[in-house]
């Protein structure tokens, strides 16, 4: 079974992906980490994230086995990731890895922006996760605070809006809900309610009742 979670920054798709993978005994890939790792390599090389040659070189030599998630989750890396991920050549370089990951039995849970539309258009279940920018900013600010990195919530909100704008309006694989994806709005949900709702969607789809 392949489950695709797509949605904007801090919508909850990463946590849902992890939890549902554990629930169903599937492997999990947070595809945002791939773009973050490309961005980090470019920044570490002293290059600008706008530098297409540097970004492509980084994408072609990526080693996901060596990812340090805590480092890659830094806000500056996310911002740069949003820039490199708009480059079609970077996306093309990362495509095979994602498809191969998904194809290994018994399947996988992938989360990102274009999983249901481009990477795994034939996924068994597609869930598009959203929440208002304000709620997402509050969650992200709390995460940073818990990690000992104080961040002004207004600054986090501005960053989220800028990233939404870039991720949704780029030409290459923009963030959008696949026609056959279920919409899961987590604005009013805590994480356990959202997990329950996502499992219900998977179960309904498996039972052949979920698609309209
Ligand atoms: O989900 P995230 O915040 O870790 O993603 C970081 C950036 O990577 C995000 O701004 C858009 C990009 N991204 C993408 O374009 N496609 C994906 N499948 C995952 C992430």
Image: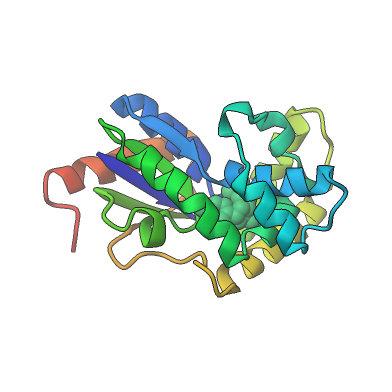
- Tell me where residue 144 sits by quadrant: top right
Question: As rendered, which of 81 and 42 lies closer to the eye?
Answer: 42
Quadrant position of residue 167:
bottom right
Answer with the quarter of the image where residue 115 lies.
bottom left
Nearest the eye: 137 or 4: 4
Residue 185's place in the image compared with 108, above or below, is below
Q: Percent x, y for residue 210?
A: 19, 53
Where 186 sits versus 73, above or below?
below
Task: Kindly identify the residue that appears in the image at 59 percent across and 74 percent down.
Answer: 169
- Depicted 162 relative to depicted 199: above or below: below
Residue 41 is left or right of residue 93, and the answer is: right
Residue drawn 26% across the image and 31% down it: 105
Residue extending furthest toward the left: 208
Q: Nearer the viewer, residue 87 or 169?
A: 87
> Residue 149, percent across and down?
82, 34
Which corner quadrant holds the C terminus? bottom left
Q: Percent x, y for residue 4? A: 37, 48
Q: Which colour scheme is used?
A: rainbow
Residue 139: x and y in percent read 65, 43
Q: Which residue is drawn at 71% across and 63% down?
A: 52
Return the residue found at the far right.
Answer: 46
Residue 68 vs 9, above or below: the answer is above
Nearest the eye: 21 or 44: 44
């Amino acid at each position: 079974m392949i489950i695709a979670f797509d949605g904007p920054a801090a919508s909850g798709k990463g946590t849902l992906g992890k939890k549902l993978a554990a629930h169903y005994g599937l492997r999990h890939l947070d595809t945002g980490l791939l773009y973050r790792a490309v961005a980090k390599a470019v920044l570490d090389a002293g290059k600008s994230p706008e530098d297409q040659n540097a970004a492509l070189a980084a994408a072609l030599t990526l080693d996901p086995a060596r990812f340090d998630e805590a480092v890659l989750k830094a806000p500056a890396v996310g911002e740069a990731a949003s820039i490199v991920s708009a480059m079609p050549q970077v996306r093309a370089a990362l495509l095979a890895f994602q498809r191969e990951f998904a194809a290994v039995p018994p399947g996988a849970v992938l989360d990102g922006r274009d999983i249901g539309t481009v990477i795994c258009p034939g996924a068994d279940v597609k869930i598009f996760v959203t929440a208002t920018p304000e709620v997402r900013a509050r969650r992200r600010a709390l995460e940073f605070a818990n990690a000992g990195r104080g961040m002004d919530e207004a600054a986090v909100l501005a960053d989220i809006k800028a990233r939404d704008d870039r991720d949704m309006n780029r030409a290459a694989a923009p963030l959008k809900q696949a026609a056959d994806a279920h919409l899961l709005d987590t604005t009013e949900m805590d994480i356990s309610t959202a997990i329950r709702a996502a499992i219900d969607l998977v179960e309904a789809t498996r039972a052949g009742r979920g698609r309209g």
